[in-house]
Amino acid sequence: MANEIADSTPVVAARRAPHYPGTRVVAFVLLAAFAVVAPFVLTEYWIKAIAIPTIIFGLSAFGLNLVTGYAGLISMGQAAFMALGAFTAVIAYGRFGLPLPLAIMLSGAVAALVGVIVGTPSLRIKGLYLMVATLASQFIIIWALQRVPWTGSGSFATLNAPPVRIAGWDVSTPTDKYFLVLAVVALMTFFGYNLVRSRVGRAWMALREHDVAASVMGVSMLQYKLMAFLVSSFYAGVAGALVVFGHTGAASVQEYELDVSIKILGMIIVGGLGSVLGSYLGAAFIMLLPILLAILMQKAAAAIGGTPAAVDTLANAEHVVFGALVLYFLIKEPKGLAELWHRLAAWVDSKVYSFNGAQTGGKK
Amino acid sequence: MGELMFGIELLITGMLIGLMYSMVALGFVLIYKASSVFNFAQGAMTLFAALTVVGLIPHVGFAWSLLITAVVMCVVAVGAERIVFRPLMGSTQLTIFMGTVGFASILEGAAQMIWGTRPHGLKLGIPHEPLMLGEVYVSKPDLISAAIAGLLVIAIVLFFKRTKIGLGLRAIADDPAAAQVVGIPLHRVWAVAWALAGMVAIASGVLWGSRIGVHFAMSLIALKALPVLIIGGIDSVAGVIVAGLIVGAAEALGEGYIGTHIGGGVQDVMAYVVALLFLMFKPSGLFGQATIQRL
């Protein structure tokens, strides 16, 4: 009997303070290492056309996840806030010659300011009414960007940014741009990751579960709902600025229409509502979707000896698959890819770190 | 005098178009009343229906094409209820709304995969010469479309008030659990509501299609019904009609008086601006019931 107790003690201790890094830590280190060496192992096409936009849209999705996933307030205007950021970036950096970091901050600030205004109705209304308010702002912002003369104006309003320089560093090659984008996104993700684990994040989640109950218990609805919109649209604005400085080199209205807002919403549904990791997983998944589909359809066409699908057939197939994925995750896996990953990591942990079954079973 | 006539002309045109918005909005109201679901896919359903009608016309003629599309829309509606919304019932409004966003994406993609992305014209054979009322020009197609829209609205109001299924719909809207207790077949009534919304989609698809052509932008037109809903109050059929008139008039007047100064395009956002004002000052709309929230 005494022997048994002596046996089990070190096991409990090991469980409380594991000496080995868990699967998630290992995966994170590997991912970080890969992110740093990626430009040297991937082709330029992958960096330029896939990695950079994925990271940028991941940031925007993370922003949307803050307001929708954490605070439970729906927003259909994330793309419009990105547009605001993009145009602010070009005007601040190109026309007024602000230093790059300041221009990026200002992009976020302008988007955040408008975001707070759009979020004001959320204090009185919610759910579907709020959806219409944000939808309205999506249309109004894009419309305004096309009409206000000094944004470039016209229905194809496009502004080109001058070559990007920061403190003597010419950000010109895809690798440079990749690192610029990665640095900004990593910084903001770190900040956001901590924010959702702070008092603020807990207040958002309380509001999400029941806003009246939360406010009765002393969570200020005014403060935290507006803050959710503020932070969320700040992230979108910075993402828009990064599109300009790190991806396309220009701000153009068509890149931020309603369908992009819906795409970002799809990213957080597929990735996982209320999950930092999920925002990026979802973004990667949705950005890779058209490429996967193109390959699949090419293979299918080759297999049956038909001609490859036309471009618009592919785009429509993407629509269908996107919608089906959104529905699948909502119904079958509401916590998204993030939850799948956590389950996988837990499974690997249980295989790798189990101590002869003593830890898991507890049965002698 | 000419100035005044111009204003009246704008007002009448706007209100005729407004009735057509009301008709689109009705599709949303139907589903909302039956299941408290805000159906983002109504626009996609409109596009799907219109493309199907136009695609079938060369093969079977107009009347048959309408009939076949009606059957197709019923299948789509029942299928959507069965495989999409039944599994989601009981989740939050937010989740169900996102479900309709996904459903919309599927429908848009499918419609254009089947019928192609090329825009189509749609002629209903309504003469295009304007009608003169005194000194005011009124477009004949607009007048006829508005009349059809108005009739449809009245038909649906009667359906809600006079039929057994309409009664069931109202009961479910009031309290789904209580309705089930007294034996109202929840799923069947939902399927009927979705199918009706599909019929509304056909009507709006055809009428709007004859006006602006059948193409992708149609689902955006349908989204303009959302401001109409907000202004009218989401659960009020009468509100939807009045709000449609207001939005139509505001758009036409805005385009006529403001748009000419800033290069047009005011009608694209006017509805949303008005809706935002309502959301800020009177969120329950003109005729909607103010909701009281309990813990």
Image: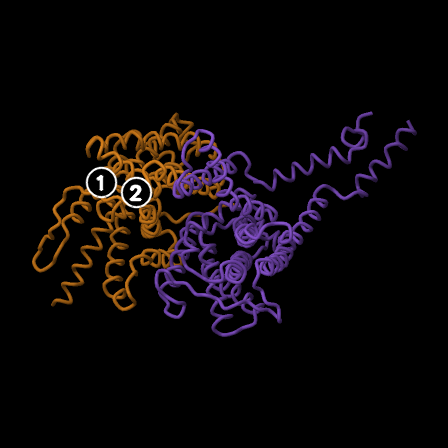
Chain colours: A purple, B orange
Residue at which label 2 appears: B26
B267 left or right of B282 in image:
left
Screen quadrant of the N terminus of chain A: top right
Residue shown at 53%/44% (left/top)?
A288
Q: Is mark 2 on a helix, strand or loop?
A: helix
Screen quadrant of the C terminus of chain A: top right
Report the number of discs: 2
Residue shown at 16%/59% (left/top)?
B9
* Percent x, y of residue A223: 55, 60
Residue shown at 35%/40% (left/top)?
B112
- Which chain does the numbered disc 1 sit on? B
Which three-letter amino acid code belongs to the residue tagged 2? Leu
Crowding near the residue tagged with mark 2, few <14, some 14–19, many ≥20 C-alpha atoms within 10 Å: many
Residue B154, disc: 1
A256 left or right of B9 in image:
right
Which three-letter amino acid code belongs to the residue tagged 1? Ile
* Percent x, y of residue B50: 28, 40
Vertical side of A32 occupied by A180: above or below: below
